[in-house]
Structures are given as C-alpha cells and as structure tokens.
Image (cartoon, rainbow, N blue to C red):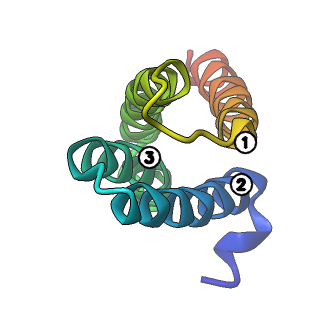
Amino acid sequence: MQKFMQNPLVKHAVEFSLMVIKYVELLEANRKFVIANQVLKSATAIGANIMEAQSAESKADFIHKLKIADKEAYETMYWFYLCEQSEQYCFDRSLSVKLDEVMRLLNAIILSAKRNNN
C-alpha cells in the first residue's frame, strides 16, 4: 500500500475515507444509522474504485473505474448536503473541502486519460 500512497489521488482518497470513518462514528453515536450507512458506503467506494483503477486492464477500464469513483463522489456530495442542511445532524465542513480536492484530482486525471486515449 505504501507504493500507492505516493500517488496523490490515492493518498487524498485514503485521507478522505479516514475522515469519513470518524464522521460516521459520530453519526452512529447520535443514532443516525441510516445516513451514516449511506455516507460510509458511497464515500469509501470512491477510494475503492480509485484503487481498482490502479490495476486496470486497459486505458478504457482505467477511465471507467475512475468514472465510477466520480459517480460515488457525487452521491457522497448529496449525503453531505443533506447532513449540512438538516438541523438534526452535525456536519464538519472540512469533509466537503476534502471531497472537493478528491473530485478535482479525479476529474483532471479522467480528462487527461481521455485526451491521451485518442
């Protein structure tokens, strides 16, 4: 795993997942189990798909796996928005900031890979 942590996208995805795990524990402590589960699934799926892309079978497979990570990032953004807007939920804005960092890197790599795929 150390080798992969030198990749900025992987590094940010892992950092983000660790932040999310802490947040989900807080949600669960406040008995917000349904949203906690949704956040945990979508947010950690971002990094899982990024890791899968590291062993892609082709450039097209690489792009496809990163696009799935991007979709999971948008789903996570939705859950974060609900948490942020709800008076019954605590929310740490740094989660959205870190998600934005991951999404910007992800989109830059997808665009670059698409340009180099033609």
CA–CA distance in space, label 3 to label 1 = 11 Å
| Residue drawn 72% across the image and 35% down it | 93
Quadrant assignment, res 35: top left
Q: How many residues crowd mark 1 within 10 Å: few (<14), some (14–19), many (20+)?
A: some
Check the picture and name the quadrant holding the C terminus: top right
Q: How many residues crowd mark 2 within 10 Å: few (<14), some (14–19), many (20+)?
A: some
Q: Nearer the viewer, residue 36 or 47?
A: 36
- Amino acid under disc 2: His
User: Is label 2 in a helix, a strand or a loop?
Assistant: helix
Q: Horizontal and vertical percent for residue 79?
A: 40, 29
Can you identify the residue that label 2 sits on? 12
Can you identify the residue that label 1 sits on? 98
Check the picture and name the quadrant holding the N terminus: bottom right
| Residue drawn 55% across the image and 26% down it | 84
CA–CA distance in space, label 3 to label 2 = 12 Å
Above-or-below relation of 107 to 30: above
Q: Horizontal and vertical percent for residue 40?
A: 36, 53
Pick whichever of labels 3 and 1 is earlier in the sequence.
3
Q: Is 91 on the left-hand or right-hand side of 15? A: left
Q: Are marks 3 and 2 in contact (CB under 8 Å)?
A: no
- Amino acid under disc 1: Lys
Q: Horizontal and vertical percent for residue 29?
A: 39, 65
Q: Nearer the viewer, residue 7 or 99?
A: 99
Q: Are marks 2 and 1 in contact (CB under 8 Å)?
A: yes
- Amino acid under disc 3: Ala
Pick whichever of labels 2 and 1 is earlier in the sequence.
2
Q: Which mark is residue 43?
A: 3
Q: Horizontal and vertical percent for residue 112?
A: 70, 24
Above-or-below relation of 92 to 100: below
| Residue drawn 48% across the image and 32% down it | 73
User: Is label 3 in a helix, a strand or a loop?
Assistant: helix
